[in-house]
Amino acid sequence: MKHFKYLIAILFVVGQALVVPANAQEDNKESRIERLKSQKVAFLTERIGLSAEDAQKFWPVYNEMSEKMDELWNEKMKNINKLYHSESELSASEKETAVDNYINYEVEKARVEKQYHEKFKKILTIDQVIKLYGAEHEFKKKMLHLIRKGKESSCEDCDELSPEKVAKT
């Protein structure tokens, strides 16, 4: 069964690697993003201890949440760019709206997290939910560490993070 989980993760990674964008510059960025997503899938699958059945239920829900969070992030960044990098001076009401939007982003982000937390509890055991949150934190921490060191990330870089350490986070 353990090998089956790894097979699922490997198949996903290989499937993602076969997607080739048309633009060469975009290819580099897109391939890095896809590689990172594949690494995250493999990392989380291993750390959570997903069975094949759980993975089939979990990943569509997780990906749906990720899309919503990405949309929120993009809106937040547009708002921040408008607020801090606008070519023209913003009026007081435009500034107030931008700041209100920033707070609204945080509220909406928390709402989405709560909504998907409830969905995750229906798919995973509570121990797996705890491991999910710990593994997400560890993955982000590991990727930030690698970025600061200027290294490409790979799943081997994540191997030093034991499931026990993730579960305690």
Image (tube, rainbow, N blue to C red):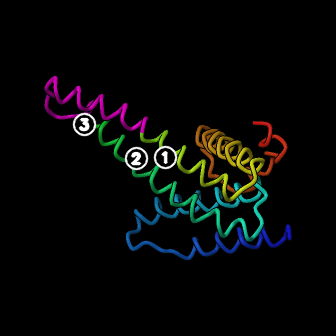
* Badge number at residue 128: none
Q: Which residue is mark 3?
A: 82
Q: Earlier in the sequence, mark 2 or mark 1?
A: 2
Q: Evaluate if marks 2 and 1 touch, with contact meaning CB atoms under 8 Å apart.
A: yes
Task: Please give left or right for residue 161 compared with residue 24 in the image.
Answer: right
Few, some or many residues within 10 Å of mark 3 (<14, 14–19, 20+):
some
Q: CA distance from mark 1 to mark 3?
A: 24 Å
Instruction: Specify the amino acid type for callout 2.
Output: Leu
Could you classify mark 1 by the number of other residues whose Cα lies within 10 Å: few (under 14), some (14-19), or many (20 or more)? Answer: some
Pinpoint residue 4: horizontal percent, then vertical percent.
Answer: 80, 73
| Residue type indicated by callout 3 | Lys
> Is residue 151 part of the magenta span, yes or no?
no
Measure the C-alpha gap from mark 2 to mark 3: 15 Å
What is the spatial separation of the Cα atoms under label 2 and label 1, in whole angstroms?
A: 10 Å
Residue that appears at 64% across and 52% down: 153
Residue 72 tag number: 2
Q: Is residue 141 above or below residue 45?
A: above
Please state which of the two labelled residues, at mark 2 or mark 1, is closer to the viewer. 1
Give the left or right position of residue 26, taking residue 123 as reference: left
Mark 2, secondary structure of its residue:
helix
Question: Residue placed at 65% from the left, 67% from the top?
Answer: 57
SS class, disc 3? helix
Q: Amino acid at mark 1?
A: Val
Q: Quadrant of residue 8?
A: bottom right
Mark closer to the observer (1, 3): 1
Q: Residue at x 60, y 40 (%)?
A: 144
Residue interval drawn in magenta = 82-107
The residue indicated by pointer 1 is 112
